Image (tube, coloured by chain):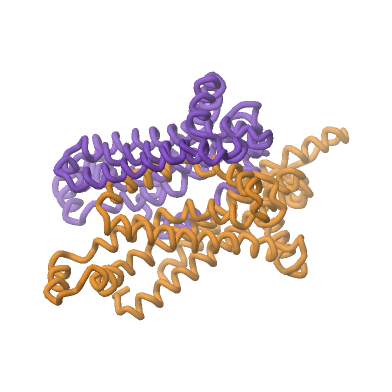
């Protein structure tokens, strides 16, 4: 019981600290902004640990964070193997191929307003569909290894990317395009120097959405058949044997991978679209 | 409708491509059969045979259409083979998750707009929560709820759906509740309006267009969440379970029919939400 009370006490103290921090001058500065969510995250972990220990929750229902951390430390080689299989071989190649294919398609239909008007509503609709359902079909076509996972990711990423790129290519203003024309710029020059840079905020928006979808696709595809490693495989088998500490360890890796992936895209976005109002500080 | 013609052209193009792909992919099987029988086949003989296989690699559109029609209208709607029945199960999960997601998103947004400390501590984690692949959590949520003695799969499915659908609502509501400008807030202050009155009379109405705009995204996300919740854990009801069954028994037609039923359901949901949005906007006098 003491663990529970300690955790509750920690929670109240941390919350009071956060309230004070948010109201203080420190919250206007960079470190202050980072500190508040970090304290909040730590509080959740401590509270979780305290609840599990204080109430004696069975490990098959919810393992404590310390148990999960210990599991991660012990099973690091297995987790790394799963990570390579699912993220490095499945999600990232699929993400690059899907985004690349969407980009080429968008450029290909760029000169035909007719096709654009047809493809945009269709693409928008398909982007809202539960495309994960294609996973079993693609696993049937491409086999159990990473090729089928990459294929699922390609299909999931393609339509959101296409819609965003086509919308982005229309984002430059009439005046700007006219200016390019008065300079005698060719189609490709105008595309390269004006319309692509103007499309970048849209493209990065699409990439961010696609990064989450890529991980979902790669993991779901493994539920339908995989070699004996991979994050989706690990989760579904460990759930079956009630090894919940391993499940949580894999989830932690997935969460970390997802956040790093998203963070990387945000960093590149900041570097590429430094001119955009949302990036100016 | 200036958009109808281009859309129809694109759709027709997709169907043509689909038929071509079906012929190419299913031809292998026909050739194998012919080789085993010791005969050779010409393309003129191959093509009809690729259209009518029982377990084609890629079923051509008319086979999927027939299976879909059979599943939707060929059975009593209470039958386990009826896609209407499975679609209803999925629809129920979607709506529960959608409702839960809306409530969670709106409440969190209210707290975030009201308390600066909530904004600073919760908002970054809400963003991070969406980078966590929810499917990783799905099997665990299902076992967890059965460990806790919860009957049925409705609640865990709804939780997964809500996890995906709360985020668009949250982001839009935060934006919407903050959309009144300083002049309007000052005006309410001169009226002597308190915190509650400002919220009810200014912030909430101002946020409504943002709210409805987010619903379309949220309902699609909720459907994806429900199907993902049905996929991995041997569920027996719902469109996701239908896909799983098709996959396990090697019946591609069942898979494709379930996939298209899910697409139709998604289309209907988005249509209905769009209709509600338009009605609400008209009622509030917001220009479309």
- Look at the picture and state if B82 lies above or below B248: below
Q: Residue furthest right?
A: B37
Residue A172: x %, y % from top left? 23, 51
Report whether B256 appears left or right of A52: right
Name the residue rendered at 37%, 39% in the picture: A43
**Could you tell me residue A231's position as x and y percent?**
56, 32
Chain letter, colour orange: B
Near-viewer residue (B79 or A99): B79
Q: Is A53 positioned to the left or the right of A117 in the image? A: right
Residue name at image x 77 percent, y 37 percent: B31
Camera-nearest residue between B45 and B190: B190
The image position of residue B220, as x and y in percent, is 49, 58
- Identify the residue at image location x=57%, y=34%: A247
- In the image, A248 versus B83, the foreground residue is A248
Q: Which chain is purple?
A: A
Residue A203 visible here: no
User: Residue at left 19%, top 43%?
Assistant: A27
Residue B42 shows in this picture = yes
Occupied quadrant, residue A233: top right
Picture quadrant where residue B135 is located: top right
Q: Quadrant of the C terminus of chain B?
A: bottom left
Residue A227 location (% of width, % of height): 65, 27
Q: Is residue A193 above or below residue B218?
A: above
Nearest the eye: B137 or B21 = B137
Q: Is B225 located above or below residue A244 in the figure?
A: below
């Amino acid at each position: 019981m003491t663990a529970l009370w300690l955790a509750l006490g920690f929670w109240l103290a941390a919350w009071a600290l956060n309230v004070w921090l948010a109201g203080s001058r420190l919250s206007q500065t960079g470190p202050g902004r980072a500190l508040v969510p970090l304290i909040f995250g730590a509080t959740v972990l401590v509270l979780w640990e305290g609840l599990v220990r204080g109430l004696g929750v069975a490990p098959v229902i919810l393992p404590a964070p310390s148990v999960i951390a210990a599991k991660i430390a012990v099973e690091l080689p297995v987790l790394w193997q799963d990570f390579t299989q699912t993220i490095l071989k499945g999600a990232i190649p699929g993400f690059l191929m899907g985004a690349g294919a969407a980009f080429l398609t968008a450029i290909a239909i760029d000169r035909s307003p007719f096709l654009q008007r047809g493809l945009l509503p269709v693409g928008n609709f398909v982007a809202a569909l539960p495309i994960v359902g294609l996973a079993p079909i693609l696993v049937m076509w491409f086999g159990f290894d990473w090729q089928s996972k990459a294929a699922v990711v390609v299909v999931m990423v393609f339509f959101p990317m296409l819609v965003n790129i086509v919308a982005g290519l229309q984002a430059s203003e009439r005046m700007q395009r006219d200016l390019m024309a008065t300079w005698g710029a060719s189609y490709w020059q105008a595309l390269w120097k004006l319309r692509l840079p103007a499309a970048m905020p849209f493209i990065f928006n699409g990439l961010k959405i696609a990064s989450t979808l890529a991980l979902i696709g790669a993991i779901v595809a493994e539920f339908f058949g995989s070699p004996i490693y991979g994050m989706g495989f690990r989760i579904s088998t460990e759930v079956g044997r009630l090894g919940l500490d391993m499940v949580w360890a894999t989830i932690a890796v997935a969460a970390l991978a997802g956040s790093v992936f998203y963070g990387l895209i945000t960093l590149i976005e900041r570097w590429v679209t430094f001119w955009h109002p949302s990036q100016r500080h | 409708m200036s958009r109808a013609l281009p859309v129809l052209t694109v759709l027709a193009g997709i169907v043509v491509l689909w038929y071509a792909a079906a012929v190419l992919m299913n031809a292998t099987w026909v050739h194998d059969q012919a080789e085993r029988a010791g005969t050779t086949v010409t393309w003129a003989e191959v093509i009809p045979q690729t259209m009518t296989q029982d377990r084609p690699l890629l079923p051509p559109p008319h086979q999927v259409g027939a299976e879909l029609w059979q599943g939707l209208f060929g059975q009593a709607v209470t039958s386990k083979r009826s896609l209407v029945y499975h679609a209803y199960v999925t629809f129920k999960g979607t709506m529960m998750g959608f409702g839960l997601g809306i409530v969670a998103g709106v409440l969190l947004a209210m707290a975030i707009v009201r308390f600066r400390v909530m904004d600073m501590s919760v908002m970054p984690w809400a963003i991070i929560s969406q980078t966590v692949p929810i499917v990783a959590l799905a099997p665990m949520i299902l076992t967890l709820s059965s460990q806790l003695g919860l009957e049925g799969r409705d609640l865990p499915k709804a939780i997964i759906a809500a996890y995906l659908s709360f985020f668009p609502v949250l982001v839009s509501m935060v934006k919407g509740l903050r959309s009144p400008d300083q002049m309007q807030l000052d005006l309410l202050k001169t009226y002597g309006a308190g915190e509650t009155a400002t919220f009810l009379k200014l912030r909430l109405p101002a946020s409504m267009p943002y709210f409805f705009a987010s619903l379309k995204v949220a309902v699609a996300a909720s459907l994806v969440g429900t199907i993902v919740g049905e996929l991995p854990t041997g569920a027996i009801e719902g469109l996701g379970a239908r896909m799983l069954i098709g996959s396990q028994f090697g019946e591609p037609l069942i898979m494709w029919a379930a996939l298209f039923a899910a697409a139709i359901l998604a289309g209907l949901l988005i249509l209905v939400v769009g209709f509600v949005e338009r009605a609400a906007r008209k009622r509030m006098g917001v220009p479309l």
